[in-house]
Image (tube, rainbow, N blue to C red):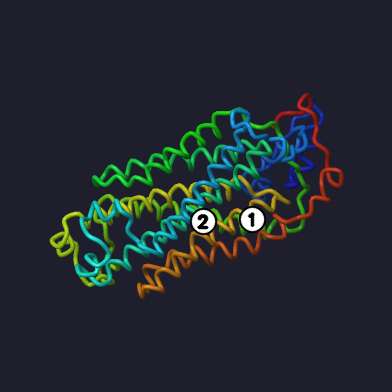
Amino acid sequence: MVRLRSPSVGDAVRALADPDTLVLAVPDLLVQSGPGWFGRVVEAATPTAPVPPLRSVGLDPRRWPGWWWGLVSGVVIAVAGLVAAAVTLGPVLLWYDRAFLNTDQSGLHAVNHHLVHFLRHDRITLAGTMVATGILYAGLAGGGMRRGWPWAREAYLVSGCIGFAAVLFLFAHGYLEPLHLALAAIVFPMFLAATRRPPERPRWVTLPEGPERNRALTGQLLMVITGAGLLVGGVAVSVVGLTGVFVPSDLAFLGTGPEALSAANGRLLPFIAHDRAGFGGALTAAAAAILLLSMWGWRRGESWVWWTLALAAFAGFVPAVIAHFAIGYVDLMHLAPVLAGMALTATALTLARPYLFAQRSQTLAGGFRPVGSSSGGST
């Protein structure tokens, strides 16, 4: 029997190489190693194949692997978010918005001179969240699912299920936004193909642990806290959108109450509530991807994890903050969760960068070698 006391994955793999040896991990090891240690050991002991070149995907969609469909779905969502941002920075209201409200920008401005700016800040925040979600899906697919990691597929699946379930929010207030429904109809078959097609065989590369591990674990903890906070925030925004529509700081900015807005235009509150509930659902889906990627994806040398989280954070946080300051909606209590998320993410990624960017030259040959599936003890 071998008692493992070091969090070294290489030591565990070498101990498991003898099928007749009972291998036990002491509690202190699990505390030091952080979440997912058993999974990392299994990955290191799994025979892997090289990652195929992109040109092997081909042009026939019927033969595209699941990870490619996941990548395409992420790109489509991100592009849709950019289009939504362009509309928000331009006309704000599309033809079907004007038809539902039976008015245009000038009519909204006559109701309340802050209302158009308020709608613009809501919609630019949603657009940024859509771009962030697309980046997360593209990263999970191209960086994780392509290499056969089951946890990447599971993170994509969980987040996608939340996002598509949130489409039902569109029916809560009687306003069915055509382009939103069209996007869901386009992406849903891609999502099914990404999750239903056979997963890739293991194609990852495992690096031995390095001296950056402790700082990286602190960064991982901060990133998990950020993801959990965003998840709570997404649920809270969804509840507000489905019930009260506004928070107190919204009404302070508008300088009016929901009764006055409803009296001016009976469809205003359902219209705003629709935007808020949609944003809450999108934020919840993105937060689930961030949380699961942070919990399961911390692997030495996997720089794509860092880039995915960094770009998603930029796309999600920065437009929201700029939009608030641009329209003069500067309530520190209202912005505190966003600013805290930015600070936590920046600190987490700074601490984890040396670990996630470790050079691939320090691969198994320099630390340990994976053993075949026929070898292994019990844990």
The residue at which mark 2 appears reads as: 225
- At 26% across and 44% down in the image, what residue appears? 172
The amino acid type found where label 2 is placed reads Ile
Residue 365: x, y in percent?
A: 86, 43
The residue at which mark 1 appears reads as: 306
For the residue carrying disc 1, how many other residues have a C-alpha within 10 Å: few (<14), some (14-19), or many (20+)? Answer: many
Residue 297: x, y in percent?
A: 63, 47
Assign a secondary structure to mark 1.
helix
**198 lies left or right of 48:** left
**63 lies left or right of 259:** right
Residue 282: x, y in percent?
A: 42, 50
Residue 54: x, y in percent?
A: 71, 40
- Comparing labels 2 and 1, the label whose residue is closer to the camera: 1
Q: Residue furthest left?
A: 263
The amino acid type found where label 1 is placed reads Trp
Image quarter hosting the N terminus: top right
Assign a secondary structure to mark 2.
helix
Q: CA distance from mark 2 to mark 1?
A: 16 Å
**Which of the 4 quarters of the picture holds residue 221?**
bottom right
For the residue carrying disc 2, how many other residues have a C-alpha within 10 Å: few (<14), some (14-19), or many (20+)? Answer: some
In the image, which disc is placed on residue 96?
none
How many numbered marks does the figure carry? 2
Q: Are marks 2 and 1 in contact (CB under 8 Å)?
A: no
**364 lies left or right of 54:** right
Q: Residue furthest front?
A: 95
Image quarter hosting the C terminus: top right
- At 51% across and 38% down in the image, what residue appears? 157
Q: Earlier in the sequence, mark 2 or mark 1?
A: 2
